[in-house]
Amino acid sequence: MFNNSVYTNRREKLRSRIKDGIGFFPGNNESPMNYQANTYHFRQDSSFMYFFGLNQPGLSGIIDFETGEDYLFGNDVTMDDIIWMGDQPSMNERGSMVGIKNVLSTDKLQGFLQKGKKIHYLPPYRGETILHLSQLLDLSYQEIKDQTSMDLIQAVVELRSVKEEVEIGEIERMVNVAYDMHTTAMKMAFEGTYEREISGVIEGIALAGGGMTSFPIILTINGQILHNHYHGNMLKEGRLMITDAGAESELCYGSDITRTTPVGGTFSQRQKEIYEIVLKANVETIKATKPGLYYKNLHLKAADIIANGLKDLGFMKGNMEEAVNAGAHALFFPHGLGHMLGLDVHDMENLGEDHVGYDNEVRRSSQFGLAYLRLGRRLKPGNVLTNEPGCYFIPALIDKWKAEKKFEEFINYTKVEQYKDFGGVRIEDDILVTETGSRVLGKPIPKTVEEVEEVMK
């Protein structure tokens, strides 16, 4: 946990942005797997963690924008709780940890909310939270959705988008855990090993690092499937293995790293050619990242590098500037270059992706591929984001576009057909936008062809 002044300062900053009513932040509760006492690993709501810092279930927080007071609601543990869980801090002690003097039991919450003040709350993403809000505020399910506070959403996005030094330190610490995860995956990527064996080992590294994985591990020899959580394949030499995985700290800050590894330890010539294109897109866009740039333009720079690289290999043809403008490159690069990273691996996505990644200056595109770009807005110092270009050969998409004769002036389908068994390549780093440019966070994780092959030796 950070020093209590961190949480006090965050609440004051929020108070300076909203002048009326109260901000209500319900924390998460335990979520049963198959019966009430057998629960999934508890994960606190990220905005509650940001302003109230307590990673336990059954808590709620209120920030009074008018009086300057903060309130923490929750119940002290019972003797039964102590028998099963050991001694726990009292609610007053928990309040002191985060700089709150006003600590009340949960049964006082509904009465507090019915004092007639305007109530600001963020969009709920769990069914039980929607029901809880409905009961507390006497609103229907639809009214709960309709009455979320845009003022609060915008203020929280503004604050959480610019990371404090303590936050950057937590993220960087989790990138270092990811270093061990990814180098271990590389060392295990040999024929006869099952994906699940590697996935299980690197998940254990995340757990040993103090928290858990920051999202379900993507580890597959079918890298053409962008978010492939199936781990049942046996590795075979000649295939590429994509590992997209990160670790989350006890304070809920995460890392998100992707590496692509040749099964057996050596890239084939055709694997190396595609890999080098993606690596160039990754390296060149990181070099170009700096405050004041639209991230959408960095995405388009990556698309241009990938398209021109594929043209050199005979997969694309014609004018590549026109091809990228038309979206022809999205056959191979159908996702965005990156997204915000912090307390959520897709930071603040529950607040609305467009509110986080876009604004009045930059609107989301409707073009295939570009529409999946989660972050398009102008960058600021303190933004932490991912950089993850990729190149994929997706048989179903290739068949569809070819049958439709789509972008025939830009795509050489005869050449593309020869690579339908290729899979995909993705390379991802976590980046901090600085005052003058950017830097890659954490211990450098091997990513050149030579570095990856050396680790695998």
Image (spheres, rainbow, N blue to C red):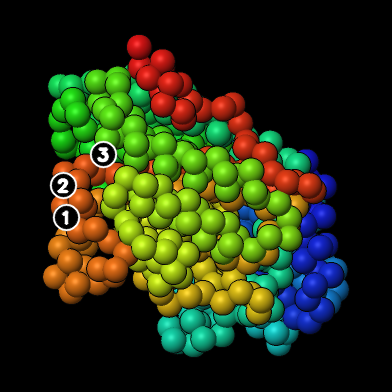
Q: Residue 130 appears at what percent x and percent y? A: 45, 73
Q: Badges 2 and 1: C-beta atoms under 8 Å apart?
A: yes
Q: Quadrant of the N terminus?
A: top right
Q: Residue at x 54, y 56 (%)?
A: 301
Residue occupied by mark 1: 414
**Front in this rendered view, residue 277 or 17:** 277
Q: Residue furthest top?
A: 457
Amino acid under disc 2 = Gln
Q: Can you say whether 274 is above or below 331 in the image?
A: above
Q: Residue 397 appears at what percent x and percent y? A: 21, 62
Amino acid under disc 1 = Thr
Amino acid under disc 3 = Thr
Q: Can you say whether 398 is above or below 359 in the image?
A: above
> Is disc 1 placed on a helix, strand or loop?
helix
Q: Residue at x 47, y 64 (%)?
A: 321
**Front in this rendered view, residue 157 or 449:** 449
- The alpha-carbon separation of the residues under discs 2 and 1 comes to 7 Å
Residue occupied by mark 3: 220
Residue occupied by mark 2: 418
Q: Can you say whether 145 is above or below 369 in the image?
A: below
